[in-house]
Amino acid sequence: MEGYVQKISAGKLKRYVQFLEISEVPDLVAQYRKWHSEEFHWKEVRDGIRAVGILEMEIYMLGSKLVMIVDTPADFNWSEAMDRLATLPRQAEWEAFVSKFQGCSADARSDEKWQPMEQIFRLYD
């Protein structure tokens, strides 16, 4: 993995870390990876994520296990943001599309699928 520069924020941030397990079927895992790539992503979905105030989002994959890391401003309200995100262009269509990989209802929202993780360690300066 090559290094990258993280965006700098003038204030405090919140970090959310969430877990999701998708289908273990190799073809579905490959497709899920494809649809999250720079080449095949849905621009409207990425634009919506930014529009609700999310600053950075990363998804890591190990087999069929996913971990998502989300950085937001300190005053970010997750529930309000997910309510708004669900109404933005193509978001409902995206959630229905990825439901076949995620093994859930086609009308399930993102925040109904991804499970929040508890931080148990942090290396402080």
Image (tube, rainbow, N blue to C red):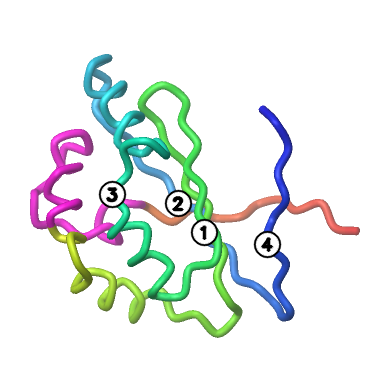
Point 58% across, 77% down: residue: 73
Q: Is residue 79 left or right of residue 5?
A: left
Q: Are marks 2 and 4 in contact (CB under 8 Å)?
A: no
Q: Residues within 10 Å of mark 2 (few under 14, many from 20)?
A: some
> Disc 3 and disc 2: Cα gap in Å?
21 Å
Mark 4 or mark 1, whichever is nearer to me: 4
Which amino acid, mark 2? Gln
104 in the magenta segment:
yes
Q: Quick one: which residue is furthest to the left in this view?
A: 106
Point 14% across, 44% down: residue: 97
Q: Position of residue 4 (x, y in %)?
A: 70, 44
From the image, tell me which residue sits under label 1. 70
Q: Are marks 3 and 2 in contact (CB under 8 Å)?
A: no
Q: Is residue 49 left or right of residue 83?
A: right
Q: Position of residue 20 (x, y in %)?
A: 35, 42
Magenta span: 93-114
Q: Earlier in the sequence, mark 3 or mark 4?
A: 4
Q: Earlier in the sequence, mark 4 or mark 1?
A: 4
Asked which secondary structure carries label 1, the reply is: strand
From the image, tell me which residue sits under label 2. 18
Q: Nearer the viewer, residue 104 or 56?
A: 56
Q: Earlier in the sequence, mark 3 or mark 2?
A: 2
Q: Position of residue 39 (x, y in %)?
A: 37, 36
Mark 2 or mark 4, whichever is nearer to me: 4
